[in-house]
Image (cartoon, grey):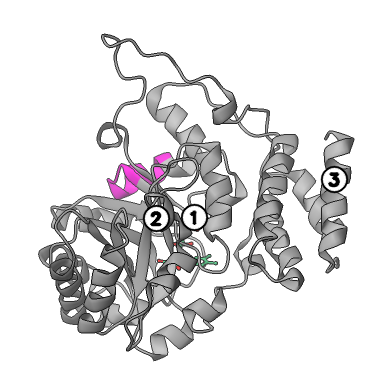
Amino acid sequence: MSGDNGGVRAPTVPRLLCSVLPPAGRVAFPELVPAPTVSPDSPDPLPPPARRGLILLAPMEGLLDHRLRAVLTRVGGVDRCVSEFIRITDQLLPERVFLRIVPELRSGSRTGAGVPVRPQLLGSDPACLADNAARLAGLAPEGIDLNFGCPARTVNHHRGGAILLDEPELVGRIVAAVRRAVPPSVPVSAKMRLGFQDGSRTLECALAIAEAGAQELVVHARTRADGYRPPAYWDRIAAVVEAVALPVVANGEIWSVADALRCRRESGCHNLMLGRGLVADPALALALRAHDTGGLSESLSWHDLLDLMADYWQRVAVGVEARHRPGRLKQWLFLLQRRYPDAARAFDTLRRVGDPRDIAAWLAAEARAGH
Ligand SMILES: Cc1cc2nc3c(=O)[nH]c(=O)nc-3n(C[C@H](O)[C@H](O)[C@H](O)COP(=O)(O)O)c2cc1C
């Protein structure tokens, strides 16, 4: 995937981890549960997102690709995904690049579980971004998201990602150019950090994005200088919510339902985007939705997780070079350790395993052991 994105490396996952959370209980996968029967007169069992707050799955280049999106959205609770960024430099990309990074475009811009996926573009040239957005729009994406938050040195060096937050006027021109280039039926959204070095221009950037006609704004509550170091400054999103008329989505350091509720309180945003928290606990969105709708909250057992991992492993076998496959599963296990003590044990066992056949054998043995 790094080839698709100009060799940009995402931050290494291990540095992102903190504490281990208590073990989980058991839940059946939603698709295995009969859908509730709704008579024409009975109320909708699930209030629309506008009333209960959207739950978005964050873009995470190098960690969360279409394979993991497919698996995580099977669990349920996610209203929409944003794809990892597609880097635009000075060329009009062929359709096959968009389709390789976001293969969901071949199936109505939805994952197998039916969750919409919005491709994300990253670049700094308004005209080139507009041309690429127009081509992407031809593939009928659910929407187009624009990245103003990437902290990677290579990207920032080429005037892309978070460094643009020092140039609110350019941010506005990018959003306006893309908005103009795609049909009105295609929503255009943006994702920003609070700033590059500091938060002194947060509102200028948010206003530029809003005035340029974006339909939604995700704010990762940290500056580029903050990197991924906790905390996330949720309270600083509140000023953005006050300043702009468009829907704002709060993001950063939401690892539990309690975090989500505190983030909502401090940011004033009901809409949330979950990243590492959902990878660490794939039932987090489901639990939050259960909280919002007064439903029953259940978590996934380690055995459920093994089913998900087996599914992921099969998907990784298609299109990922054999030598990179073990790393993919280990990355996920590394984050799962936060929530599942069994994942810590598994990570320890697999730490030095580099042969995909050994991973497959381990998965089969764990499944037989019936943990
Ligand atoms: C490995 C990794 C890759 C990321 N890639 C992207 C990306 O492609 N586009 C983007 O807008 N944000 C990206 N992000 C930022 C996340 O979308 C999110 O804003 C950040 O992780 C904070 O949310 P969290 O604490 O819920 O993980 C990435 C983050 C990580 C950890």
In the rendered image, residue 263 lying in the magenta stretch gets the answer yes
Q: Is residue 31 left or right of residue 86?
A: right
The residue stretch that appears in magenta: 261-271
Q: Quick check: 361 above or below 87?
A: above
Q: Are marks 1 and 2 in contact (CB under 8 Å)?
A: yes
Ligand 1 within 8 Å, label 2 CB: yes
Ligand 1 within 8 Å, label 1 CB: yes
Give the mark nearest the N terminus, 3 or 2: 2
Image coordinates for residue 111, horizontal then vertical, percent? 47, 48
**Residue type of the residue flagged with mark 3:** Ala
Decide: few, some or many residues near mark 3? Use Cα within 10 Å; few <14, some 14-19, many ≥20: few
**Residue type of the residue flagged with mark 1:** Gly
Viewer-side residue, 285 vs 369: 369
Residue 251: image tag: 2
Task: Label 3: state its secondary structure.
Answer: helix
3D distance between C-alphas at marks 3 and 2: 36 Å
Residue furthest to the left in view is: 211
Task: Label 1: state its secondary structure.
Answer: loop
Q: Is residue 21 visible?
A: yes
Ligand 1 within 8 Å, label 3 CB: no
